[in-house]
Image (spheres, helix red, strand yellow):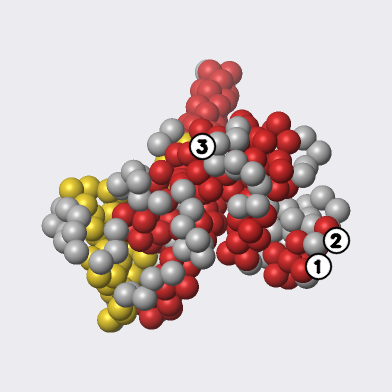
Amino acid sequence: MARRGIRWVAITAVAAAVITAAVFAGRAIWQIAVSHLSSNSCSVGDYDIDTSQASVAAAMVAEVTSYRDPLPERAAVLVLAAALQESKLTNLPPHAGDRDSVGVLQQRPSQGWGGGNAKRLTDVGEATREFLDALVKIPHWQTRPLAQAVQAVQISADGSAYAQHEPEAQALADALTGRRPAGINCSFQAPTVVAPARTVAAQARSQLGIDTPVAAGRTVRVPGAGWQTAAWFVANADRLGIDRVSYDRHVWTRTGGWQRGPASRHAVVAVMATLQG
């Protein structure tokens, strides 16, 4: 009987250990699943990028569409492909890349980019503008194969590498220029910082080159705007704390994505999130 009692105690202990391990494993799996499902990411066609990459891409496309001379969408595809290869759409600070390369396009001040000033190249708009200034001087850049056109500007060690990014760059350009309505969809955790609506309006004016954004309370309204402005708000929603964007019978929210809903086609409207107390 004593042996049976000892055996029973041992079996009970082992069972308890197994159950405890299963509980902790279950919790770990659940935490991983929640973390995965709530990750800050954006989808553009068949491609996924994180929200910081989306914000950088939107700034680059805005620079193309507000360039001093009208440029075709091809320019956006070329500069995005360059950025995907050089930095994966990340605005790298000085000393984070190769040699003295800086910024989203890894331009080198020692080669004249930024007028020799590395700090200038950490501005995504400035870096993109300098790329475009060089691009438009390349003969037939609009019709050249992507890798050739980009390499003529970047002059990298392996110019053929740019070609692999053309499909993704095209998808991003279609979504962020507004050519593909509701083309970018972002989801992210509830924001902990929310920019004032007036700050969001000012950034929209600056990046998109438009003068119609109006801030009132938690809302930014942009009369006469279109799908590019709507895409810009969504791409920057995580960074700025935007909770809702509406335009042309479509409504985007950070938890539900784009859905059909009541929205005017005469203005793009962004609503800032409310911080939880």
Q: Are marks 2 and 1 in contact (CB under 8 Å)?
A: yes
Q: Residues within 10 Å of mark 2 (few under 14, many from 20)?
A: some
Q: Which mark is residue 168?
A: 3
Looking at the image, tell me whether mark 2 or mark 1 is earlier in sequence order. 2
Q: Residue at x 73, y 70 (%)?
A: 119
**In the figure, is residue 48 to the left or right of 226?**
right
Image quadrant in which the C terminus is located: bottom left
Count of marks placed on residues: 3
Q: Which mark is residue 116?
A: 1
Give the amino acid type for the residue marked by disc 3 in the picture.
Answer: Glu
Give the amino acid type for the residue marked by disc 1 in the picture.
Answer: Gly
Between marks 3 and 2 in the image, the one whose residue lies nearer the viewer: 2
Q: CA distance from mark 3 to mark 2?
A: 30 Å
Secondary structure of the residue carrying tag 3 is helix
Secondary structure of the residue carrying tag 2 is helix
Looking at the image, tell me whether mark 3 or mark 2 is earlier in sequence order. 2
Q: Residue at x 40, y 51 (%)?
A: 177
Give the amino acid type for the residue marked by disc 2 in the picture.
Answer: Ser
Q: CA distance from mark 2 to mark 1?
A: 6 Å
> Residue 226 appears in which quarter of the rendering?
bottom left
Q: Which mark is residue 110?
A: 2
Residue 241 % position (x, y)? 41, 67
Q: Please name whichever residue, 95 or 79, is drawn nearer the observer in this view of the structure.
A: 79
